[in-house]
C-alpha cells in the first residue's frame, strides 16, 4: 500500500491558541523537527477550511494571501512535508469570479512555495446541500481539474479525500478513473454514507468500502500516503490495523 517511509503521518493545525503559527519561534520549531525525526513522524499541515482561498474583496484578499504565505514559510521550519490547501467557496451567484480569484491565488502561492521548499496539496472538498447558499469549490472532478490542469509545479500536488468522492454521483471509482493519480500525494480517509452529507465517521459507521478503494488505488500504482481524518487521535490510531486488514481482504499485498 502507499505509505511514507516509516512512522505515521499526522496533520497539525496552526490556527488557534498556543499552536497559532504566529507563536512559533526558532527554538520551538527545532524541537518539533527533532521530535518528529526521533519518532519517525511525517508532519503535514492543513489550512483552515473557513479561510476563503477564493476571496476577492479588498483587504480580505490581501489577508488571505498573507495567511497562506505564513503557512508556506513555517512549513520548512517545522520540517512539514506538505500543506493541504483548498480552492475556497462561492455564494452561488459568483462562481466564475471566485474560481478565477482562487486559481490566481493558488498560482501565486505555488510560486511562493517553490522559493521556500514547501509543497501544496490541493484537496477535493465536500458537496453542500443543493439549496445551501455557500458551496465549496473543487468538490467535483470538473472543478478540481480546473485548478490542477493550470498549475504545473513540483511544489504542487493533490490530496484526494476519498470520503468526499463517496458523496458524489461519480463515487470513488469515478474519481480514481478521472484524476491524474501520479499527482496525488495523499489519500484522506473517513467513513460516510453513499450520496449522503458531509460526515467524518469512524470506519464501520457508514457504508464506505475501504477494501475496494485500496484495491483500486494500489492497482493503479498509488505511492503516496494514507491519512485518517475522523474522530480523535486515538480513534485514528486504532483504525490503522483495521484499515490494513480491509486492504488485505481485498487482495492488496500489505
Image (tube, rainbow, N blue to C red):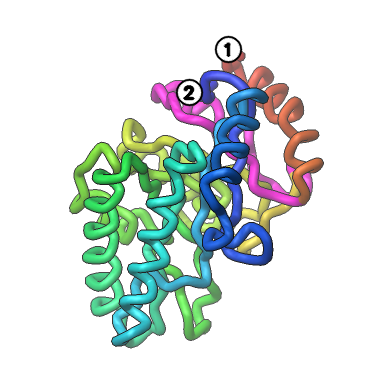
Q: Position of residue 176 (x, y in %)?
A: 41, 39
Outermost residue, top side: 253
User: Which label belongs to residue 218?
Assistant: 2
Residue 118: % across, % down: 36, 43
* Quarter assignment of residue 14: bottom right
**Residue at figure coordinates x 28%, y 59% from the top left:** 106
Q: Quadrant of the C terminus?
A: top right
Residue for point 54% across, 59% down: 21
**The one of 130 and 102 positioned closer to us in this rendering:** 102
Q: Which residue lies furthest to the front in this view?
A: 27
Does residue 126 appear left or right of residue 88 in this picture? right
| Relative image position of residue 9 (x, y in whole percent) | 59, 34
Is residue 7 shown above or below 81? above
Query: Which residue is under mark 1?
Result: 253
Q: Which stretch is magenta? A: 203-231
Disc ID at residue 222? none
What is the quadrant of the N terminus in the image?
top right
Which picture quadrant has residue 27?
top right
Amino acid at each position: 500500500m502507499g505509505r511514507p517511509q516509516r512512522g505515521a503521518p499526522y496533520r497539525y493545525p496552526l490556527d488557534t491558541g498556543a499552536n497559532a503559527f504566529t507563536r512559533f519561534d526558532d527554538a520551538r520549531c527545532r524541537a518539533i523537527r527533532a521530535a518528529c525525526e526521533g519518532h519517525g513522524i511525517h508532519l503535514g499541515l492543513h489550512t483552515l477550511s473557513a479561510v476563503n482561498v477564493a476571496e476577492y474583496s479588498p483587504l480580505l484578499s490581501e489577508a488571505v494571501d498573507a495567511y497562506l504565505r505564513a503557512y508556506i514559510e513555517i512549513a520548512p521550519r517545522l520540517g512539514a512535508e506538505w500543506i493541504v490547501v483548498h480552492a475556497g467557496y462561492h455564494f452561488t451567484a459568483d462562481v466564475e469570479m471566485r474560481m478565477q480569484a482562487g486559481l490566481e491565488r493558488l498560482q501565486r502561492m505555488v510560486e511562493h512555495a517553490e522559493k521556500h521548499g514547501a509543497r501544496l496539496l490541493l484537496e477535493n472538498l465536500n458537496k453542500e446541500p443543493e439549496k445551501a447558499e455557500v458551496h465549496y469549490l473543487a468538490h467535483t472532478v470538473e472543478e478540481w481539474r480546473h485548478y490542477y490542469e493550470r498549475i504545473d509545479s513540483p511544489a504542487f500536488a493533490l490530496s484526494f479525500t476519498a470520503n468526499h468522492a463517496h458523496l458524489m454521483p461519480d463515487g470513488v471509482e469515478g474519481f480514481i478513473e478521472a484524476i491524474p493519480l501520479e499527482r496525488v500525494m495523499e489519500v484522506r480517509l473517513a467513513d460516510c454514507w453513499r450520496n449522503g452529507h458531509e460526515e467524518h465517521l469512524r470506519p464501520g459507521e457508514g457504508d464506505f468500502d475501504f477494501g475496494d478503494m485500496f484495491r483500486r488505488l494500489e492497482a493503479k500504482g498509488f505511492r503516496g500516503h494514507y491519512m485518517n481524518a475522523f474522530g480523535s487521535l486515538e480513534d485514528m490510531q486504532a483504525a490503522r490495523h483495521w484499515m490494513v486488514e480491509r486492504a488485505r481482504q481485498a487482495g492488496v499485498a500489505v
